[in-house]
Amino acid sequence: MGNRQSFVVPLSVCVVCLVCVRCYRVHRALKSNILTYGELPGFVYLSARYVVRAVGRRPGCLYGAPGKRLHYRLCDSRLETHALRQFCGAAGYGADYPDSEYRDIPLCFPEVLCCRLMLLALTHDDFRLSPAGLVRVRQTLRTFQPIDELKKGPFTLQVQVLEYQQTDVGVEVDVRLSAASHCGSPVWESCVTLLSRRKLTSHNQPQESEQRESSAEEVKQVELSVPRMTGLSCSWSFSEFSPHRLHSVPLRFFGFRSEMTAGLWMLSICLAEIEKHKGVKVVTAPVRVSAHFEEPLMVPGNISLSFWKTIRGEGLSSAEDVCCFHMRQDGRDVSHVVGRIIRA
């Protein structure tokens, strides 16, 4: 017994020292806003930063004074095949999707690559909101060239925190995510609007009339089932940055329905189904996707996804091909996602 204790104590000290050295190296690396892939901290470190920032701040309140624009850049990033397959399997494309002929990497996948970089920005001292309870309300995606360009070599990811805006229900912040190829040319860009609410109130906004099914022709409708474990099957669902997603996990094991489905998952499902029924040309670069996230999606349940083509719309030329989409849940007269895909 004595020999075992004499072995365990030095080993424990070594482990603690290694952890401290690792944390110190990460802390020093984060003094710069330009990181390499080896300097990117893990989710344990980021989760600790998340908890520290969340405890000291109330949602819906601005802290600090306006300063320089917060941004991080990740160099020499590489595409992880395992993460891509996991994403495709969870988001409705199928685990073998990237190997299919004439198909590009899904439009939402680069956001998964930016997840840790985005958490760094949202837990930074200069970020003026609490990272807890941030809700995705709007998003705009753009592709300048096929996302498959990221497969050709090390690429660059960047996250920028843009403007804060006071609203009736809280504070909104725009965060821009971008990916550039190994030669520096822009490939993909996304602007995500996150809302930090002061209280649990509805933040629905009326959408444009051209995005409603009543004004469209040849509406295609797809019925899908959302399993109970959808939230847990998405390893990237933490990108919603809402602690209630973790709190509601135990309730689901006792049969309760919970708002566990991430906004990124809902948008990915919409794009996957549209591609399956309309063909890959609908999402072939260059393309722009805009989406409004209204009510959270309760799981388990059934959803109804409608999509249709139109050339009508404010600010759109007759040469632009527009596909609108709308997701709602069966049994509830509410919308979850309303958006459109625009191709010149």
Image (tube, rainbow, N blue to C red):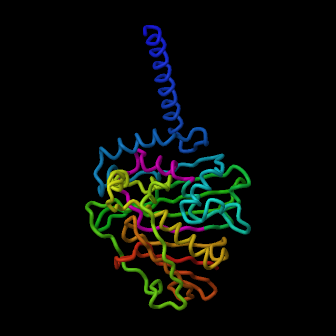
Viewer-proximal residue, 263 or 179?
263
Viewer-proximal residue, 201 or 193?
201
Against 332, is 103 above or below? above
- Quadrant where the image shows the C terminus: bottom right
Left or right of residue 228: residue 272: right
Against 282, is 9 above or below? above
Determine if the magenta segment contains residue 119: yes
Percent position of residue 150, x then y: 68, 56
What residue is at 63 percent from the left and 77 percent from the top?
282
What residue is at 41 percent from the left and 41 percent from the top?
49
What residue is at 51 percent from the left and 39 percent from the top?
30
Percent position of residue 33, x then y: 53, 44
What residue is at 42 percent from the left and 63 percent from the top?
136
Q: How many marks?
A: 0
Q: Quadrant of residue 318?
A: bottom right
Viewer-proximal residue, 260 or 160?
260
Farthest left residue?
A: 199
Left or right of residue 332: residue 156: right
Determine if the magenta segment contains residue 109: no
Percent position of residue 279, x then y: 65, 77
Farthest top residue?
A: 2
Tell me where the magenta segment starts and ends, as one range. 113-142
Against 148, is 73 above or below? above
- Quadrant where the image shows the N terminus: top left
Q: Quadrant of residue 143?
A: bottom right
Percent position of residue 28, x then y: 51, 33
